[in-house]
Image (cartoon, coloured by chain):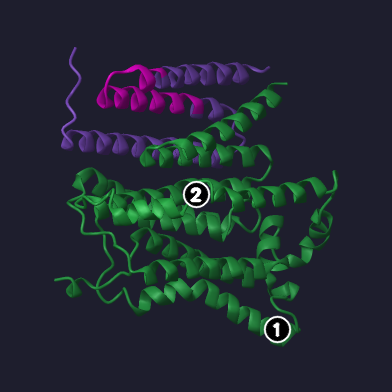
Chain colours: A purple, B green
Amino acid sequence: MIPSDYLSVALLIAGAIFFLAGTLGLLRFPDVYTRLHALTKADNVGLGLIVMGLVVQAESWAAVGKLLLIWVLVLLAGASVAHLVARGALQRGIRLWKR
Amino acid sequence: MLQWALDALLGLGLLWLAWCALMSPNLLKAIVLFVAFGLLMALAWVRLDAPDIALAEAAIGAGLTGALLLAALARLRFAYADEETVGSPAQEEAKVRFPQWLPAVPLLLVVAGLGYVVLSLPPYATGLSTEVTANLESSGVSNPVTAVLLNFRGYDTLLELVVLLVALLGVWSLDGLALGRETAPGPVLDTLSRFLTPVFILVAAYLLWVGAHAPGGAFQAGSVLGAAGVLLLLAGWRFRAGLTELPLRLVLVAGPGAFVIVALVTMLMEGQLLEYSPEQASILILFLETTATFSIGATLAALFFGGRPQDDKEHT
């Protein structure tokens, strides 16, 4: 393995940890708002780390551009959909979770 | 070993998701599970080295079919919201007349037929891939999938486009509920749709162009355009008055129409349906794919819209 491979592995594993944490939060958090928090925050960072891990391996600048575009689009869609889901939940009168 | 484990996980996951989607009493949950099934199915196609089908499965199978099912569910809820006749005598009677096991009979026949066909296939077959590779030079494109879809078996694609059009005609003639006037979409959805629409168009053009030498093509590009239409419809955009009649219909039939014209011309010139001369094949395929992309996109968006689009003045 060359040094860039180690960097890739480290980034991919870090990304996977974020995905794992996000999934755990989605399954374990008490209400829709806290679940959204876990999902969007963790998945955006997790996907970013995985994209970075793949960018290190990319063969051309065009591939780097496409990978980054995927991340930006997912960031945009994720944030917007999280907002829409939360707004829909508020409009239906789902209360915020309180201990 | 690791690859084998991944494939086994994928296969078992597919079966499990399919079972959950079928058995879920909650329709919304069933649709979400169906979309998850489609995404996993796309991964399975990637593992089978079929990226073209993976793209189509993710875009049409999971994305647009999911959107269509959700739209249908929303209309069901709207239609039955103020009816208290769920257990009416007519419905009870219908239940008695059609026992629940009845649909299982044709289903089992289909399963038996498919099983027979699969078991009677030769264990190893090269198929037609060597012939496709041998004739790829004269097809006008370098992606074998596009060569088969648009050149060697162009009439299949022609008939697929016609099927899509007939589906829309069916929806229109049912005269169901069209997507109503939504409440204000809110600034986020509005901005998102405005920002993403050019990106959708760019991606569709890219997929259309790249189809000549890599996975992509009219159906993938058309479904991206259709997705743009769905997003715009959700954000409150409606057909402008005057565009719903002739212009919309022209776009809808452009793809199949261009195909039929090219088929007739090639029959007159070359004596064979959809047989292009190698010099013109490339430009003809690009022409057919471009018109098909517009038609597929418009048809999918119109299917999502539901009922026949009408001018606003007829409502008010």
B69 vs B169: above or below: above
Q: Which image quarter holds the N terminus of chain B?
A: top right
Q: Which residues are magenta?
A: A24-50
* Relative horizontal placement of residue B179, taking residue B70 as reference (left or right): left
At a point 71% along the width and 58% down the height, the residue shown is: B142
At a point 59% along the width and 79% down the height, the residue shown is: B260
Q: Position of residue B104 (x, y in %)?
A: 57, 48
Which quarter of the picture shows residue B304?
bottom left
At a point 26% along the width and 55% down the height, the residue shown is: B79
In the rendering, which numbered label is found on residue B267?
Answer: 1
Q: Secondary structure at mark 1?
A: helix
Front residue (pair B279, A90): A90
In the rendering, which numbered label is found on residue A48?
Answer: none
* Relative horizontal placement of residue B123, taking residue B263 as reference (left or right): right
B169 vs A41: above or below: below
Q: Amino acid at mark 2?
A: Ala
